[in-house]
Amino acid sequence: MIASYQKLVAEVNKKTALVRVASLKGPQAMRAAAETAAKAERRRDVLASKLAALGVVLGE
């Protein structure tokens, strides 16, 4: 589960960077990229809460 969390952190970072790139392509592309990044953040947060419930301390 920790490896999955680390993958999600990397995915969130990548998708957040894509929002910046998409902003150059227009508002629709930026909106879609922002929604995708938000979904990735929610997945990361859900997994972090599951790990916290198991007593795993994560270093951000």
Image (cartoon, helix red, strand yellow):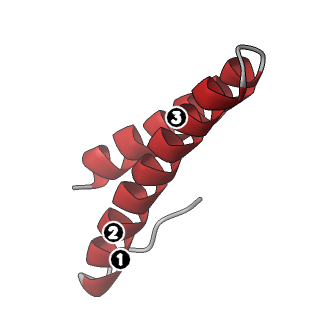
Residue visible at 28% across and 85% down?
53
Instruction: Report the front residue among 17 and 47.
Output: 17
For the N terminus, the image quarter is bottom left
Residue pointed to by mark 1: 49
- Examine the rendered structure and indicate whether residue 44 appears above or below residue 7: below
Q: Earlier in the sequence, mark 1 or mark 3?
A: 3
What amino acid does circle 1 point to?
Ser
> In 3D space, how far apart are the residues under numbered discs 1 and 3 (Cα atoms)?
26 Å
Mark 1 Cα-neighbour bin, 10 Å: few <14, some 14–19, many ≥20: few
Residue pointed to by mark 3: 32
- Examine the rendered structure and indicate whether residue 45 appears above or below residue 26: below
Residue 48 falls left or right of residue 38 = left
Q: Give yes or no for contact between labels 1 and 3 (Cβ–Cβ under 8 Å).
A: no
Instruction: Report the front residue among 49 and 25.
Output: 25
Point out which mark residue 46 bears. Answer: 2
What amino acid does circle 3 point to?
Ala
- Secondary structure of the residue carrying tag 1 is helix
x and y, in percent, of residue 43 in the image: 34, 57
> In 3D space, how far apart are the residues under numbered discs 2 and 3 (Cα atoms)?
21 Å
x and y, in percent, of residue 56 in the image: 34, 74
Q: How many marks?
A: 3
